Image (cartoon, helix red, strand yellow):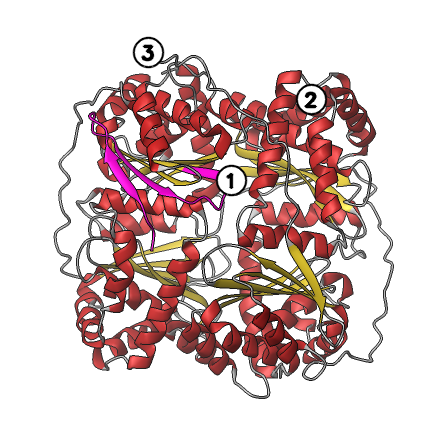
Amino acid sequence: MIHRSQAPDFKVLETLAPIPYKVHTLSNAVPVYSIQAGELQVLKIDFIFNAGEYYQHKPLVSSATLNLLSEGSSSFTAEECAEQLDFLGSYVYYNTSKQSSVISLYCLEKHAEQSVKIVHEMLKNPLFLQEKLDTYIAKKQQQYMIEREKVEVAAQKLFARTLFGTQHPYGKSAEPEDFLNLTRNDIVKYHSKNLQPNYCNILISGAFQEKHGVMLETYFGEQSWKQTPIVREYTAFAMQQSAEQKHYVERDNAVQTALRIGKPIINVHHRDYAALQVLNTILGGYFGSRLMSNIREDKGYTYGIGSGIVPYKASGCFVIASQVKKEVRSQAAEEVYKELARLRTELVPTEELHSVRNYMLATMARNFDGCFALSDSCKFLMEFELTNDYYQNYWNTIRCITAQELQRIANEYFQEDSLFEVCVG
Amino acid sequence: MIQYTNFTLHNGLQCIVNTDLTTPFVAMNTLYKVGSKNENPDRTGFAHLFEHLMFGGSKHIPDYDAALQLVGGENNAFTNTDITNYYLTLPKENRETGFWLESDRMLELDFSQRSLDIQKNVVIEEFKQRYLNRPYGDAYLLLRPLAYKIHPYQWATIGKNIEHIEDATLTDVREFFYAHYAPNNAILTFSGNISAKEAECLAHKWYGDIPARTLYSRTIAQEPPQTEKRTLSVERDVPTNAIYKAFHMYNRLHPDYYACDMLSDVLSNGKSARLYVSLVQNQKLFSEINAYITGEDHAGLLIICGNVMPGVSMKTAETAIYAELHKLQREALREYELQKVKNKIESHIIFNETTILNKAMNMAKFAQLGDVNLINTEISKYQNVSVTDFQRIAGEIFRESNDSTLYYYAKNYKQ
């Protein structure tokens, strides 16, 4: 006879092995991080540039440059490039963020060299033809018009602007007229200044072998990819928070309202960061979080609500996000503030802390499981110039943090009068 | 090549185990053979609503999610027209918790009015968020009933309308559970750090005493062949015109299913695919265009949808799509192009095997189709497709009389 009311015994995870990455440097000083993991004959190669929107002089330049790399180079046309990659069954993704531009190649090991050759060619000798730029702009402009109809997109843009101001790269986003102002010259300049070995880190993971290191030297070392002598200036932008803390843009035809509440906050380099992540998880970082339990499961105001701490290189962002029934917008926000107040005034019960601890430890272990997960975790270290110690400290904080410490963090970072609120819909 | 062991408990529960000791986790997938196609036409959206209720507490465990999170588990679920699928991953040390949780909710749910009321609200908000409050969100709610006149694929999994969700009662919930949730209507799969022997032992322990149930199965009428082109025009507050085409295709086990899947790849998988090159890149008629198959168990749809560029008429856009489709009927594919699609599929299948969760889900899906070994043999079915198959199938599918088209006009743009 089994006792169904009795949960089986379980264990708390104790240790986390460090990411097994190795680093070597190509002859042009480009660092290569390599991770040998997994049994499948696949490879993922990331080219991570310390660039991104922070270094663009106009909106859209960084993403346009990245997306136009595959649209023709001195040795192949856009069509040939697409054709070859498709034939190899290789995938290249382009991702631009506030602080980095990343080109990710996924390929079968047997096609590694042919695929890498294509990436080399597109990075080194892109043509950025006017005609391709025109097509790209027309397409993007249309997608943009569709995207901005979505209340969550509009709310997110307004939220960033409110927190960081329209002059700061973290606050600025593209406006319709930016599509008209984008020129080929912007793109060429951005490429020559930023997508260069000077700012590149390579991360290779999967069925990695020594010969792949040699291959990378051939295509991305001094002989084929020289550092640029062009000096890139760094601008320290000033953040300008909105004077108004609450913003509401009504949309008559909307049946839901997108809600954002948050503020600029500390990032990975601050000693409270890991503790803040634990607190955030309790608040809105997992399915059983207080916001989900209250606003979705108890009140039924929404399909989902969550919160996050998003680290940027020069700052961070705390955001609570949801789409709620239009008529309960204020009640939903009220409940959010109540939950924040509860974190400031009451100690987190032992049971709950125990549960969040175990959940977070397992989540970390999951982020270290398998070659692509390891690769993503390693990429994070590279972007923020951290080492494995970062994850060890994070792990220890999750294991040891007390309810008292969490309450201190809540009082330091989650004061209601420091928060901004944005609603669209 | 995925190695697996399978066994069936005496109550009919089918179990499949893939052991992978390189990971410290175990993925566990529970597939119930019920989807929106099994719903009462006057109570649509029920299978999906029910999926939400499965998290509202079971006979001995009041809070599924809390119990799972406590041991470091992560889970989710989805419902489609054919199945309802629940999946989770756990640290290997705590895998028994997965058996405990999943078996209890297979045994019996805690049918509560409060949970029903809350989840109805949540699902209605999901309906609004995904289908009503976003541009083009209702396109598939409109396209399905255009393509299907008889078959229950005519409604989307979310349901025909919000009223159906509002009207659900606790009696409906209870009936639905006993009609469809049973060991003899489920498939349990594992991938990761668990041996076949351990899995079998734990399956016996936790699932062995759940009784097999008498299942209720509604007879599903097959869709009669379409005989003429169907169209529907709507006007919405969206930035640009869009076009949605649905062509009836083959069921999941039909030998021509694979060629049909590849046909959609030739049209739109990757930047060298035909529709992209011709209609987006060269003619600049669309800002984006896609072709894909719904991949459903019964005869599904091959869908082509695209956003039309400003200033381009719907007629021009549609004619250009047809020109590409006719080309596939008229001219045989070059071997090179066929090989390209095959390579892409091979790569896709290998990348798909990189996580234990995908492996557990795929094994369950193939077992539900009738043969778990399809997980290893499918690739050869794609490899065997020839250029003549292609041309024949393009001829069968891309006929006007097999076409249901939704013209989605932007207000003020109608031409």
**Marks 3 and 2, the one that precedes in the sequence:** 3
Residue plotted at (45% across, 58% down): A40
Chain containing mark 1: B
Q: Is residue A393 left or right of residue A203?
A: right
Q: Secondary structure at mark 1?
A: loop
Q: Amino acid at mark 1?
A: Pro
Q: Amino acid at mark 3?
A: Met
In the foreground, B408 or B169: B169
User: Of circles 3 and 2, which is in front?
Assistant: 3
Examine the image and state in which quarter residue B394 appears: bottom left
Query: Marks 2 and 1, Cα distance to the nearest angstrom?
Result: 39 Å
Q: Which residue is mark 1?
A: B24
Which range of residues does the magenta coloring cover?
B1-27
In the foreground, B24 or B143: B24
Where is residue B406 drawn, in percent x and y? 32, 57
Query: Marks 3 and 1, Cα distance to the nearest angstrom?
Result: 30 Å
Examine the image and state in which quarter residue A14 appears: top right
Residue B5 painted magenta: yes
Q: Which mark is residue B139?
A: none
Q: Is residue A390 left or right of residue B389?
A: right
Could one spot residue B316 in this view of the protein? no
Where is residue A6 drawn, in percent x and y? 45, 13
Chain containing mark 3: A
Where is residue A211 drawn, in percent x and y? 57, 72
Q: Amino acid at mark 2?
A: Lys
Chain containing mark 2: A
- Residue A11, compared with residue A130, is above or below; it is above
Q: Which mark is residue A338?
A: 2
